Amino acid sequence: MILEKSAPTGAHPFCRSAHLVMRIGLTIMIGVVAFKPTSDPLAEAPLATAELIEIGRRIYEVGTLGSGEPLRANRGDDGIAASGLAAACINCHQRSGFGLFEATNLVPPITGPSLFSNAQTSASSRRQAKGMEHQQFSFLERSPYDELSLATALRDGVSPSGHRFQYLMPRYPLNDNDMSALIAYLRQLSSRPAPGIDATAAHFATVIAPQQDAARKQAFIQVLQNCFQERHPPDAGSRAWQLLVWELTGSPNTWDAQLRTRLAEQPVFALISGLGSEEWEPVHRFSEMEKLPSLFPNLDAAPPADQDFYSFYFSKGVLLEAEVLGQYFAENSRALGLTRVVQLVLADSAGAKAAGALHNLLKQQPIAVEERVLAEATANEIRAQLSTLTRADALVVWLTRSQLETLKSVPPPAVGQIVFSGWLSGLEKAPIPPGWKDIGRMVYPVDAPQRRDVRMQFNLRPWLSKHSIEYGDEILLGNTLAACNLLSEAMSRLRGSYFRDYLIEMVQNYPAGMGNAPAPQAFPRFVLGPGQRYSSKGAYIVKFKDPQSSELELVHDWLVP
């Protein structure tokens, strides 16, 4: 709630910036702020009931008062007002309470220790240009808040030292009950470090779904173990990183209990990477319920995450391909003379989820959609499903690399267009017969082969060779290494403030500051922002240059649905 200086014009009525981005040079400023509580703010706080803290949380996060009415705030003389979620503290100070930087503008921390203990600057000398005077942030020179002074600050915009806040900081006309609830919530906000990190080690876990290929699983684990050992070795004299491998068994409806047992046995700070296919919802729900960060697992189909907080994915996988195809057919079906989209899919698979998503996306389009569901993907079964197709049909093939081998004994149907899933088929290595390649297209949800190959050549392959890791799926290994590097970079930016919400905010708010961390990954760019949970958001449409080769050429440039 306590803001320094002003922020540039933007979408939010108070923050004035829809996406506050930390400039790399300003990371030095974070190191200047070193909160050193002289006592425990929770120990000195009046007893607060869980109900009171929950009311305070709703005020802080969603802008709802104890009465159920919307929170109201204003900027006093300039007449700008907001209510409800638009007035909530979380918009500027973040869920963790650690605030944000943008250029020279600071949204300072309002965690329990930062508000109710002495905020002191570090003793380190400051570099400054000749003739320039260092001016300290006012919130670092004030005395600690108490109940009365914080209420005054929130209502009138005046700090304990008499400093009047800038216009960016709203004034909140809260009644005594709501004020007590909000203060009770702020006292405990980010006051206790999250489980999973102790004096000697930081504990992380990776989750592996059942029925994963043994060689694939081994190479995946090797990447994480070597990354942990290289970046945070146990003999380096600092806090070592410990990797736990949580291998799940049985049906997905048993995974939640397995995960809870593992977490109780050894708390972890976050879940890093992971290995699965189309079924990841139980892990996703567990992460959200436990408020446990889950960063960039390797999946064929990622769960819906746009409304959630704790889970990040490199891509939606085949579900993104379905969205891209939905837009592609909506824009081009008439020009291509197509009146129907027929989807060839194996029952209960990642492709089945993609087919369902594409069906829903095309419901509002003047083109029919239907699924031809296979039981076992045999040659006879596929041949029977294709016998009635015509030139007015587009055939979408949601089959995996091993299932595509069956097409060698099946002639391609006489249709207007055939489109393969690049994610499932193996991209340019897909075992597609020449006759099918000749008229086929492919959704290509990763970076162009030549550019990706250069990144793999300079970033990934030397690292794999150094650690004697051999496995053919460079996308899997590159993304796993990228996830580990992103975690390491984000953890370093926490600067000892080990809170899970703060880690999430580092990942979503400052991707541009992650430097070369995502370089080995398969996607064109690493892009995230507040509320965004999928880094890659588009795909190409490509075709084979020659039926006898694996070389691809562009049909449609990067398409973001």
Image (cartoon, grey):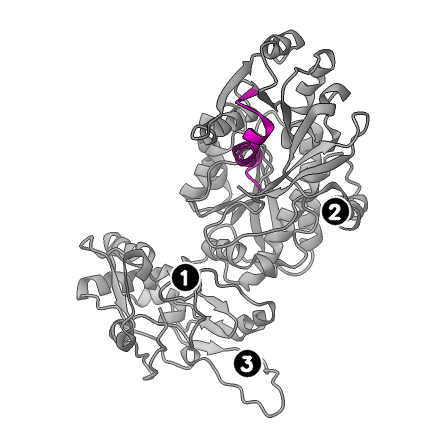
Residue 440: give x, y in percent of width and height.
69, 26
Asked if residue 324 is among those painted magenta in the image, a careful observer would answer: yes
In the image, 395 versus 17, the foreground residue is: 395
Helix, strand or loop at label 2? It is helix
Left or right: 554 in relation to 139: right
Q: Residues within 10 Å of mark 3 (few under 14, many from 20)?
A: few
User: Which residue is found at the position 18% from the left and 54% from the top?
Assistant: 67
Q: Where does label 1 land, which residue?
A: 11
Q: Residue 123 shows which numbered tag?
A: 3
**Which three-letter amino acid code belongs to the residue tagged 2?**
Arg
Earlier along the polypeptide chain: callout 3 or callout 2?
Answer: 3
Mark positioned earlier in the residue sequence (3 or 1): 1
Question: What percent of the width, then of the height, locates residue 275?
Answer: 60, 35
The mark that comes first in sequence, 2 or 1, is 1
User: Spatial distance from mark 3 to mark 1, Cα to Cα?
Assistant: 38 Å
Circle 3: element type: loop
Looking at the rendered image, the disc whose residue lies closer to the viewer, 3 or 2, is: 2
Which residue was labeled with disc 2? 451
Quick one: 527 or 194, which is closer to the camera? 527
Neighbour class for label 2 at 10 Å: few (<14), some, many (≥20)?
few
Q: Residue at x 42, y 71 (%)?
A: 37
Instruction: Estimate the spatial distance between the alpha carbons at disc 2 and disc 1, rounded to whole Å.
Output: 35 Å
Q: Amino acid at mark 1?
A: Ala
Estimate the x, y position of residue 340 in percent, counting from the top left: 53, 21
Relative vertical location of residue 132 with respect to residue 285 in this rendering, above or below = below
User: Which secondary structure is most common in the magenta stretch?
Assistant: helix
Residue bounds of the magenta highlight: 314-343
Question: Which of pointers 3 and 1 indicates the residue nearer the eye?
Answer: 1
Q: Residue at x 74, y 15 (%)?
A: 408
